[in-house]
Image (cartoon, rainbow, N blue to C red):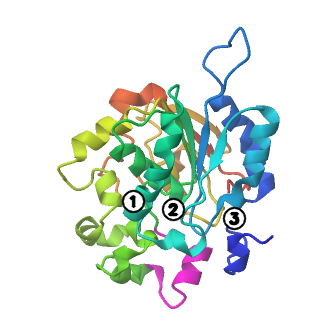
């Protein structure tokens, strides 16, 4: 069976099993109970949200690994907005995934773990912002464009074959463009005013534009027990890659796990004068934020 990427002519965009498996032991450690239990350990349910052009099939290796290492763990890979449907507006996807995760959370009063890949990481962050009664213990963001996308990748070349990166703002920062998920987080640093005025999604969840729900969304998101951001270059998915873990290394005060990483690479890449959404959380949640960066040739997805 071919993945959605192969069927759409987007080879190389999906989760390469070898590289992804290198991260699995780390992910499983995060999902373990905080303290050893004297009797049989009951693991919290795991919910997985896929990314752009993906489907639940893309995460079969993760599902198999969790089942093998922690038998009895309930793992749900949500099968919504697969393939081309992942281009639907992100707020529409947030509502769809909200309806899917609510009953899972209701059956798990002890909490759940949320693993979200690429575009799915943005869906999950918005989801955690708008759900005032969520019980997510760990939110793991895998190679997600938390501060936006600005760069040429395989799927962008497929979506907009005749458009240059520098011209995509003309499409994305229009009412028509905002009907496509990729445009909901397209962040062109050369047209910041247009981005702030036109963005119907990213500018709102990042708190870059004032809106009446900002305080409530922040409070809801801070219900998360632990936030883990994982990213690195050369995966062909998100550019600039620092968008996945965008934070000032010298001032963040968060936990870093990294290999072959020059701290100077971890910077405010798009706007040095603007604090990122994660920095705005650090005063209340610094002990719950973890960063894992890898600048080797391992493809995270």
- Cα separation, mark 3 vs mark 1, equals 26 Å
Q: Mark 3: which secondary structure?
A: loop
| 297 versus 36 height, above or below | below
Q: Magenta segment: does it hold 157?
A: yes
Q: Given this view, does label 3 or label 1 mark the residue nearer the observer?
A: 3
* Total labels drawn: 3
Q: Which residue is drawn at 56% across and 75% down?
A: 84
Q: Looking at the image, do the residues carrying marks 3 and 2 touch, with CB atoms under 8 Å apart?
A: no
Image-based side of 54 in relation to 60, left or right: left
Spot the residue most to the bottom.
162
Q: Mark 1: which secondary structure?
A: loop
**Pointer 1 residue:** 270
Nearer to us in this view, 91 or 191 = 91
Taking the image as drawn, is residue 107 in sight?
yes
Tell me the crowding category of disc 2: few under 14, some 14 to 19, or many 20 or more residues within 10 angstroms, Cα based: some
Image-based side of 228 in relation to 253, left or right: right
Q: Give the range drawn in magenta.
A: 150-165
Q: Residue at x 53, y 72 (%)?
A: 85
Q: Tell me the quarter of the image containing the N terminus.
A: bottom right
| 287 versus 52 height, above or below | above
Image-based side of 164 in relation to 176, left or right: right
Tell me the crowding category of disc 1: few under 14, some 14 to 19, or many 20 or more residues within 10 angstroms, Cα based: many
**Pointer 2 residue:** 240
**Pointer 3 residue:** 14
Q: Residue at x 46, y 25 (%)?
A: 287
Q: Magenta segment: does it hold 262?
A: no
Nearer to us in this view, 165 or 139 = 139
Percent x, y of residue 74: 67, 37
Nearer to us in this view, 14 or 265 = 14
């Amino acid at each position: 069976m071919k993945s959605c990427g192969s069927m759409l002519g987007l080879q190389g965009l999906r989760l390469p099993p070898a590289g992804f498996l290198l991260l699995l032991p780390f992910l499983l450690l995060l999902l373990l109970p905080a303290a050893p239990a004297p009797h049989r350990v009951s693991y919290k349910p795991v919910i997985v949200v896929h990314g752009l052009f993906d489907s639940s099939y893309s995460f079969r290796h993760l599902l198999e690994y969790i089942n093998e290492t922690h038998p009895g763990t309930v793992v749900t890979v949500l099968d919504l907005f697969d393939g081309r449907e992942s281009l639907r507006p992100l707020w529409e996807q947030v509502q769809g995934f909200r309806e899917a995760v609510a009953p899972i959370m209701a059956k798990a009063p002890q909490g759940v773990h949320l693993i979200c890949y690429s575009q799915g990481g943005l869906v999950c962050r918005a989801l955690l912002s708008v759900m005032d009664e969520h019980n997510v213990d760990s939110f793991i963001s895998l190679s997600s464009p938390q501060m936006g996308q600005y760069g040429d990748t395989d799927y962008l070349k497929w979506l907009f074959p005749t458009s240059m990166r520098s011209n995509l703002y003309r499409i994305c920062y229009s009412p028509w463009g905002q009907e496509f998920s990729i445009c909901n987080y397209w962040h062109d640093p050369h047209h910041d005013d247009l981005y702030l005025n036109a963005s119907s999604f990213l500018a709102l969840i990042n708190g870059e534009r004032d809106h009446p729900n900002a305080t409530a969304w922040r409070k809801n998101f801070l219900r998360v027990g632990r936030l883990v951001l994982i990213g690195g270059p050369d995966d062909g998915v998100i550019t600039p890659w620092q968008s996945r873990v965008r934070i000032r290394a010298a001032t963040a005060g968060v936990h870093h796990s990294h290999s072959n990483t020059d701290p100077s690479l971890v910077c405010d890449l798009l706007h040095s004068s603007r604090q990122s959404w994660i920095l705005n959380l650090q005063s209340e949640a610094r002990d719950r934020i973890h960063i894992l960066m890898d600048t080797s040739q391992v493809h995270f997805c």
